[in-house]
Amino acid sequence: MSARPEPPEVDRAAAGRAAIAARRARAAVKRAVADRSRTALDVAETAWADAASAEAGLRVRDLLTSIPTLGPTRVAKAMRALGIAESKRVGGLGVRQRARLRHWLAARRAPAATSRLVVLAGPTAVGKGTVSAYIREHYPDVLLSVSATTRRPRPGEIDGVHYFFVDDAEFDRMVGAGELLEWAVVHNSYRYGTPRPPVDRALAEGKRVLLEIDLQGARQVRASMPEAVLVFLLPPSWEELVRRLVGRGTESAEEQARRLETAKVELAAQDEFDVRVVNSEVGEAAHEVVDLMLVPEAPGAPH
């Protein structure tokens, strides 16, 4: 078999220029989705209407990753659930894949998908407070419920921002008046509870609400508000959890030992939760939690 002749130099140069132009056009599409001047659904419909368009040449993974607040972990899960390979381009999807992706993207835009209650729980020292603080700073449209507690403030904590610091008498009054959505005694010492009126009011207004609470409280919310999505925050490893607890230096050695024993019990309860998120990097974990308030699961998607 004779060797295939090399294309003329001028043809190679033209092909190179065309490839550069195509990459720039796809990058422009991704920027438009990222700045919300176009929706991902509009991009997909354009791709399916014109097989020669920049939209058609865009990889599905790149399209979904361009959507604000949709991180790479969530994208990977969605693509697996939708049955779309990592290498697939939007224009190359089959009829059934197009239907599933169209339904999923359309569901993201539905008003009902923007009002959701998410409960964040996990073992001691896993970083719930750090993840919640990141969400408070970077997602101001998410209402982070402020819990009431009978413990004293730690250095840097502000009353009404991190917690409502109350005495035992006031906490008793709130319990008796039915003002707490949930409450519990944590680490055999202090009581924590979630004031219910602000949560009910925010949900009635269509807002997204995050509750950062302990395991006992999450179970109470599951019983009273089954529509809530329960998220269990995991450490990357047990060794990392121990390092975080010891490193923060806010408890005595005896208290640290007691909390680590409690953490073992708490970790064993993770299968009770709807979703598990590993807190390896705070920003990525926060993205995943916020995504749960915005993105419906793809059909048949596993947690």
Image (cartoon, rainbow, N blue to C red):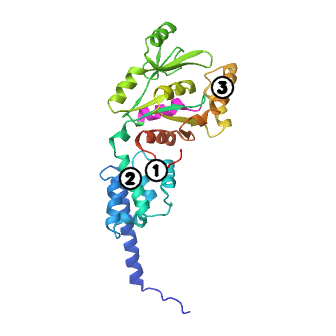
Residue 28 in view in this figure: no
Residue 215 in view in this figure: yes
Q: Where is residue 190 in the image (x, y as percent from the top left)?
A: 57, 15
**Residue at 38% over, 53% down:** 103
Q: Where is residue 93 in the image (x, y as percent from the top left)?
A: 43, 64
What amino acid type should be assigned to the residue bearing mark 2? Answer: His
The span shown in magenta is 126-137
Left or right of 132 on screen, residue 268: right
Label pair 1/2, CB-CB below 8 angstroms: yes
Q: Main secondary structure of the magenta part?
A: helix
Q: Distance from label 2 to label 3 (Cα)?
A: 43 Å
Q: Earlier in the sequence, mark 1 or mark 2?
A: 2
Nearest to the eye among marks 1 and 3: give it. Answer: 1
**Residue at 65% over, 39% down:** 237
> Does residue 196 sit above or below 247 in this rendering?
above
135 in magenta? yes
Which residue is more in the foreground, 170 or 222?
222
Q: Distance from label 1 to label 3 (Cα)?
A: 37 Å
Residue at which label 3 appears: 262
> Does residue 108 sit above or below 129 in this rendering?
below
**Residue at 49% over, 6% down:** 169
197 in magenta? no
Residue at which label 1 appears: 299
SS class, disc 3: helix
Nearest to the eye among marks 2 and 3: give it. Answer: 2
